[in-house]
Image (cartoon, rainbow, N blue to C red):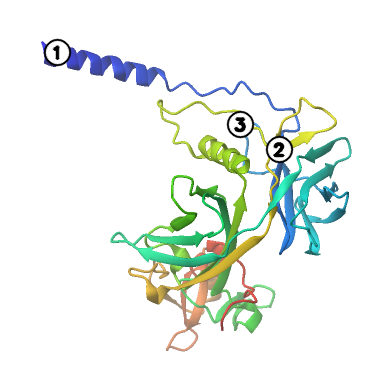
Amino acid sequence: MLRTTTIRITLILLVIAWGCKDPYVSPYKSPPTGYLVVEGYISGNAVTQFTLSRTISLPGDSTIPTIDGAGVQVEGSDNSTYPLTGIGNGVYSSVDTLNLNPQLQYRLRITTNTDQYLSDLVSYKATPPIDSLSWKQDVTGQVTIYVTTHNAADTAGYYRWDFTQIYEHHAGEESTLYYDVDTVPKRILPRTPDMFTYRCWTTSNSTAILIANSTKLSSDVIYEQPVKIIAPDDIQLSVLYTTLVRQYSITRDAYAFLNLMQQNTESLGSIFDAQPSQITGNIHSLTNTAEKVIGYVSAGTVQQSRLWISRYQVRNAYSDACQMKDSLVGNDSATLYNDFYLGPYAPLYAGSCPNCWFMNFKDCQDCREQGGVLQKPGIWPN
């Protein structure tokens, strides 16, 4: 009897779970232009930068509409103003470090063609230095990067982190030749230095919300907080990887906002999850008080630290070899035209026989096919 009842309850639960797969319809209706999204930080020891964009309706596409041509300025509680300059793609930046007074409060004012927005005044928070930036590789090959910090002046602290990462990656093969389609007849020629596509660099910023607090501890210490996870055999660790981690000390209200944002955006979406909550930041529309704005403005100092990881420091590093072995092709013009112009192949290097060439797929010879650019970053070692 107990077994039958258990089976019956299980079936009922399965039916309920199956019936809960209807798509979630949000009760919040955004305006046709989307909600304004404000991202950035008022910094007293680094360049101040904010990004303005708009939300998109679900399902939508991956193109986030940014806002250019707005007036953006930082204002102090002493009526001081610090205009920010638009540099494109919705980004507004100070030319240099702002001369801020730690004893004052600051806010952000945004003026578009039709609307004006203003954040609440916020206190200036000094951020303690990063004690260490470290990494570990577990038995599966996964690499985790950790940050450790402490603040002897406080008994409880709230922190946020973000980072900019750069990694070098190579094509599967280095081609020294190319098929010149502009000559008559078309022929294979040596590549010039500006035509090499073997070595690339990819730069990207963090997208996850990275926060932590020490409220449950007797002292303000954050020990080995994970800020980045790199999967085993990931291309990011194929040659050389670096990340510049930035640390911000934030208020309790800012932490609460980011924590709610994190819950809404990173939930797994199971039937047991809480429904998405309405997020209210500290930025408001002066034109339409009913309009919702997504974002939270904080002010203070920022601390940063850089970490490097070489492929020789990790186990089971990424393999960039081509899937197909190099193939030999003769110098017949029709074959070259079919393989190199119409087909997916490109020449690699000369064979030992007269007028013959080794070839492989084009995308295996061009590192840009994996993302990234050919220009080496200024901070990169030779």
Relative placement, left or right, of 166 versus 116 is left
Residue 243 seen in the figure? yes
Q: Nearer the viewer, residue 247 or 35?
A: 247
In the rendered image, residue 153, in percent from the top left (x then y), is placed at 56, 58
Instruction: Say the numbered circle drawn on residue 4.
Output: 1
Quick one: SS at disc 3? loop
User: Which residue occupies 32% across, 61% down?
Assistant: 138
What whole-number distance in Å separates the C-alpha atoms at marks 2 and 1?
Answer: 55 Å
Q: Nearer the viewer, mark 2 or mark 1?
A: 2
In the rendered image, residue 18, in percent from the top left (x then y), is placed at 37, 20
Sequence-wise, the earlier of marks 3 and 2 is 3
Residue pointed to by mark 2: 282
Relative placement, left or right, of 58 versus 351 is right
Sequence-wise, the earlier of marks 2 and 1 is 1
Q: Which amino acid does label 3 sit on?
A: Leu
Rendered view: 242 above or below 6: below
Q: Which of 121 and 97 is in front in this view?
A: 121
Q: Nearer the viewer, mark 3 or mark 2?
A: 2
In the rendered image, residue 201, in percent from the top left (x then y), is placed at 57, 69
Residue pointed to by mark 3: 58
Neighbour tally class for label 1: few under 14, some 14-19, many 20 plus, Cα within 10 Å: few
